Image (cartoon, rainbow, N blue to C red):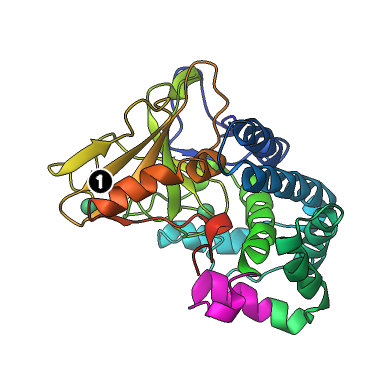
Amino acid sequence: MNTPTTAQHTAGEAPAIILPDPESIFLTRAERFDALALHHGLGEWLAFLGRLSRAQDKALKAAEPDLAPPATETLELARKHRMPPVSVASFQRPIVWHDILRSIVGDLLENAPVGARETLDALLLTSAEELDKLAEKLLNGEPERADMDRLPYIAAAMQVVFTAVASKLDATALPRMEAHSTCPVCGSHPVVSVIRSEGPTAGLRYVHCTLCNTEWEVPHATCVTCGDREKVTLHEIDGDDGIARAESCGACESYMKLIVQGPNARVDPIADDLASVALDMLVDDAGFVRSGPNYLLIGAGE
Ligand SMILES: [Zn+2]
Ligand SMILES: [Zn+2]
């Protein structure tokens, strides 16, 4: 878990918004994927995603100096109009993202499973123009079936870009969004929510952005999608470790998972979400539709 980076954060007071820590975010995720892969039916896939997270960490640290936050005027304007300042709809994607993608793909190719090798090779041959189009489709459009294999890697590179930029903002100067389901940095949806167990945020629930890894507080037992507090129900798998639960809403028929941080467990929102797909099946079967995407799962099942 990342630590709060708000400038004026005082002890005992929980921040409303927590920005990602670029030093540790992808490394912690990689370690969590490694641990989850050890005793899991999807172990090989989770181990591969651990390598992907490690490649993201390396790419972020190399590209970090080239990833600048928006200009002060843009930040001011966003604050005034309560808009996300690094919005996926308008933020000019820095050209260095092509290098980030190539670095991630190169690292994975060193020991890639047969199924992934073809896609990774294809990505190295994809023109810069086509890569930009794929990124646009991922973030703002309707991806096509033919794009699905390549999109998790495009998403991984975009996560690096938006996470690095988010980490350079001032959390105390960000606008609060009207909807619980809108990231106050990039405007994307949250992937899951996390019940934190340490420090001033202990016991509070934060939702975690699927793209930029920013977290923002949302009250317990409140539907993240529609705000309903009456028809919220918790689901979990009997005999499970209790880390992943799902909160469904009878008002809008959506659900979002809750990842519960134990006293010693180094859980990660993205990794623990993917390790608990059985819970998704349970809640899907009960008739609820998942509200937030996990970009590393995009295209699975196509
Ligand atoms: Zn975000
Ligand atoms: Zn709802």
Using the rendered image of the protein, determine whether residue 71 is visible from the camera's viewpoint.
Answer: no
- Given residues 89 and 260, the one toward you in this image is 260
Magenta stretch encompasses residue 276: no
x and y percent of residue 30 in the render? 69, 39
Q: Quadrant of residue 251?
A: bottom left
Q: Secondary structure at mark 1?
A: strand
Magenta span contains residue 145: yes
Alpha-carbon neighbours of circle 1 within 10 Å: few (<14), some, or many (≥20)?
A: many
Q: Position of residue 152 (x, y in %)?
A: 62, 62
Instruction: Classify residue 246 as left or right of residue 150.
Output: left
Relative depth, front residue between 164 and 72: 164
Frontmost residue, 265 versus 48: 48
The amino acid pointed to by label 1 is Ser
Q: Is residue 189 left or right of residue 57?
A: left
Report which quarter residue 192 is drawn in: top left
Q: Main secondary structure of the magenta part?
A: helix
Number of marks drawn: 1
Residue 109's x, y, as percent?
83, 58
**Which quadrant of the figure contains the N terminus?**
top right
What stretch of residues is rendered in magenta?
132-149
For the residue pair 273 and 201, the one nearer the viewer reads as 273
- In percent of the image, x 52 and y 77: which residue is there? 143
Instruction: Tell me the quarter of the picture where residue 238 sits.
Output: top left
At x 34%, y 40%, the residue is 218
The residue depicted at 73 percent of the width and 37 percent of the height is 23
Instruction: Residue 216 in the image: state x and y as whole percent.
Output: 44, 42
Left-right relation of 51 to 83? right
Res. 247 in view:
yes
**Is residue 301 found left or right of 284 in the rendered image?**
right
The residue that mark 1 highlights is 248
